Image (tube, helix red, strand yellow):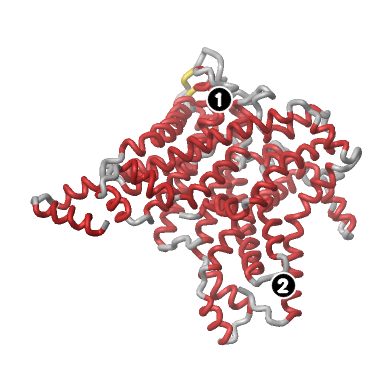
């Protein structure tokens, strides 16, 4: 983009870049540094020896996996229907779904609270998985439909003429072709579920069902506000996410910026 | 495959069946395919919104059996509530500030990193890790950094700006700025990635031509690169607006909406009213108002986008 033929101008660009990026790195440095203050690595040992810790991770993983399965299956079916099949009043149904795109989860709290309590789902994973999936679907369907729209009709028609049913055409032609967008949807849903704070806060009260986003609060209580241990717990919960991102950089970048891919 | 499709076509035509018939044969009805997503998502969400609308006409604490119907009184209460107007103001400020700064920073980073600096991959990781991390996990870190004895004041003192050191989160005048800074910290990575992708699509010949015409770096950024990525800028405006309306985690966890409502957003106000305070009816009325704002905004932004005929090229 910018021309930097001369070495000096290249150095200047590098310096500007470095100065601009420092504010983005400093909070992470402060986090690690703060977590090692006081008793040093002892903070980590104290956090890791809390018996509930693995439960928080297990709960987050369970919720994320269930949400991904629901979102992926429903998204792919609906996106194929919307993109390639005949549906009377299709655009009406589509807009019905898309209108929910801007729905903030906070407006669902009261009705869901009343409903989940009467269905005996309060304080179960379903109380988080169901609204989380429902909120992700409008967006993921939009993404997948736009992608499947780009697959030529002829491919599907040809398969049907060769005797394949719609189901087979979907399974053998559409699904393999949607892998890139499917991966982006999975990563997007994974992070949405893993990082969600409000739904677990309201619907999961028992520490044995809570998720990792509740950990900082849990540790504030556990270590009577010992900041160094709270920060150590933040590092421990952040680490899997950072590692996953470093391993799957492209997928994460595509999944998280998918919000503007319309 | 082509031959078989041609045979089917001719067979169709030979039997005198119209294109409509052929179409319906090739495009079977798809209700069954969209039904699960519709029933589940539209069902759950619209049911909740409808239920919220009903609750908004009640005076109710959410659990007690006695319920009073109060009509639109909760809405009247909202319009007369100075905190409600404060949250609207904060949402607007948040949208303008975070959109402007994240967009500008993302654009500059994308341009700089497209110029092949040394260790470009490291810079990208530094920008994107904040996007990946949960705000809920970073909240205690930021509370610590901006505390009176936190690292930010320490840094100010060590670079000779000790006079500026202050309890950032405890004053109404500075708390919102900190909340916005945290939001920008976590959002710039997305605008960077999108601009980066959009810049990759710009025709290099256009840039070379400008260079031959003697356009400098700044001139090319402003006159060629910026107009070429306008679709991305519009998409980011939509994202920031949705983000501003959904704001909850950061102000709730870092400042609990305080001090003195200085960082109260619609999300935190609705949560506090509905759950800890148990004024479910009033919280529901605020929710409906939030939905109306979101819907109006979506329509306005969508109309603006279609009018300009802009498309995201990211």
Residue under numbered circle 2: A13
* Relative vertical location of residue B44 with respect to residue B185 in this rendering, above or below: above
Mark 2 to mark 1 CA distance (whole Å): 55 Å
Tag of residue B280: 1
**Label 2: few (<14), some (14–19) or many (≥20) C-alpha neighbours in 10 Å:** some
Q: Position of residue B251 (x, y in %)?
A: 67, 41
- Tell me which residue sits at (43%, 29%) in the image: B47
Left or right of B8? Residue A12 is right
| Residue B57 visible to an observer of this rendering | yes
The chain to which mark 2 is attached is A
Q: Nearer the viewer, mark 2 or mark 1?
A: 2
- Tell me which residue sits at (74%, 30%) in the image: A53
Q: Is disc 2 in the same subunit as disc 1?
A: no
Most foreground residue, A5 or A171: A171
Q: Secondary structure at mark 2?
A: helix
Which of the 4 image quadrants contains residue B191? bottom right
The chain to which mark 1 is attached is B
Most foreground residue, B148 or B212: B212
Q: Position of residue A141 (x, y in %)?
A: 43, 44
Left or right of A206? Residue A185 is left
Left or right of A141? Residue B124 is right
**Label 1: few (<14), some (14–19) or many (≥20) C-alpha neighbours in 10 Å:** many
Q: Secondary structure at mark 1?
A: helix
Q: Where does the N terminus of chain B fall, quadrant-wise?
A: bottom left
- Tell me which residue sits at (43%, 38%) in the image: A74
Tag of residue B91: none
Q: Residue furthest top?
A: B65
Q: Position of residue B245 (x, y in %)?
A: 56, 44
């Amino acid at each position: 983009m910018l021309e930097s033929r001369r070495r000096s101008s290249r150095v200047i660009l590098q310096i500007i870049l470095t100065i601009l990026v420092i504010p983005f790195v400093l909070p992470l440095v402060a986090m690690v540094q703060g977590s090692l203050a006081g008793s040093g690595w002892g903070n980590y040992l104290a956090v890791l020896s809390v018996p509930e810790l693995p439960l928080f991770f297990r709960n987050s993983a369970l919720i994320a996996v269930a949400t991904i399965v629901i979102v992926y299956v429903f998204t792919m079916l609906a996106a194929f229907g919307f993109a390639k099949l005949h549906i009377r009043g299709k655009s009406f149904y589509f807009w019905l779904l898309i209108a929910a795109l801007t729905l903030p989860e906070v407006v669902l709290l009261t009705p869901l609270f009343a409903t989940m309590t009467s269905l005996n789902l309060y304080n179960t994973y379903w109380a988080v998985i169901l609204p989380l999936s429902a909120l992700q679907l409008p967006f993921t369907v939009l993404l997948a439909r736009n992608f499947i729209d780009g697959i030529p009709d002829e491919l599907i028609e040809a398969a049907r003429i060769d005797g394949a049913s719609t189901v087979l055409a979907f399974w053998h032609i559409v699904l393999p072709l949607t892998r890139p967008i499917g991966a982006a949807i999975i990563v997007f849903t994974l992070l949405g579920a893993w990082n969600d704070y409000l739904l677990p806060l309201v619907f999961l009260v028992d520490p044995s069902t809570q998720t990792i986003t509740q950990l900082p609060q849990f540790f504030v209580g556990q270590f009577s506000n010992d900041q160094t241990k709270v920060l150590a717990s933040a590092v421990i919960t952040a680490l899997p996410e950072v590692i996953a991102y470093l391993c799957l950089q492209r997928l994460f970048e595509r999944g998280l910026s998918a919000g503007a891919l319309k | 495959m082509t031959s078989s499709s041609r045979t089917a076509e001719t067979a169709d035509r030979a039997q005198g069946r119209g294109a409509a018939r052929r179409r319906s044969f090739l495009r079977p009805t798809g209700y069954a395919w969209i039904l699960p997503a519709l029933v589940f998502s539209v069902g759950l969400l619209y049911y909740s919104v409808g239920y919220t609308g009903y609750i908004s006409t009640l005076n109710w604490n959410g659990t007690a059996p006695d319920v009073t119907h109060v009509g639109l009184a909760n809405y009247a209460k909202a319009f007369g509530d100075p905190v409600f107007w404060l949250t609207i103001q904060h949402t607007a400020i948040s949208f303008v500030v975070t959109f402007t700064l994240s967009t500008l920073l993302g654009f500059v980073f994308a341009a700089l990193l497209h110029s092949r600096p040394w260790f470009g991959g490291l810079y990208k990781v530094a920008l994107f890790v904040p996007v990946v991390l949960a705000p809920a996990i970073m909240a205690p870190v930021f509370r610590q950094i901006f505390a009176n004895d936190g690292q930010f004041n320490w840094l100010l003192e060590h670079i000779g700006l000790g006079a500026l050191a202050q309890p950032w989160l405890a004053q109404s005048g500075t708390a919102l700025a900190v909340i916005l800074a945290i939001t920008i910290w976590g959002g710039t990575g997305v605008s960077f990635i999108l601009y980066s992708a959009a810049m990759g699509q710009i025709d290099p010949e256009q840039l070379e031509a400008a260079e031959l015409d003697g356009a400098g770096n700044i001139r090319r950024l402003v006159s060629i690169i910026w107009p070429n990525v306008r679709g991305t800028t519009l998409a980011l405006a939509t994202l920031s607006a949705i983000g501003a309306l959904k704001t909850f985690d950061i102000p709730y966890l870092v400042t609990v909406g305080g001090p003195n409502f200085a960082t109260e957003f619609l999300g935190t106000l609705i949560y506090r009213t509905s759950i800890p305070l148990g004024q479910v009816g009033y919280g529901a009325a605020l929710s409906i108002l939030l939905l109306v704002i979101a819907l109006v905004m979506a329509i306005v932004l969508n109309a603006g986008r279609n009018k300009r005929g802009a498309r995201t090229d990211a």
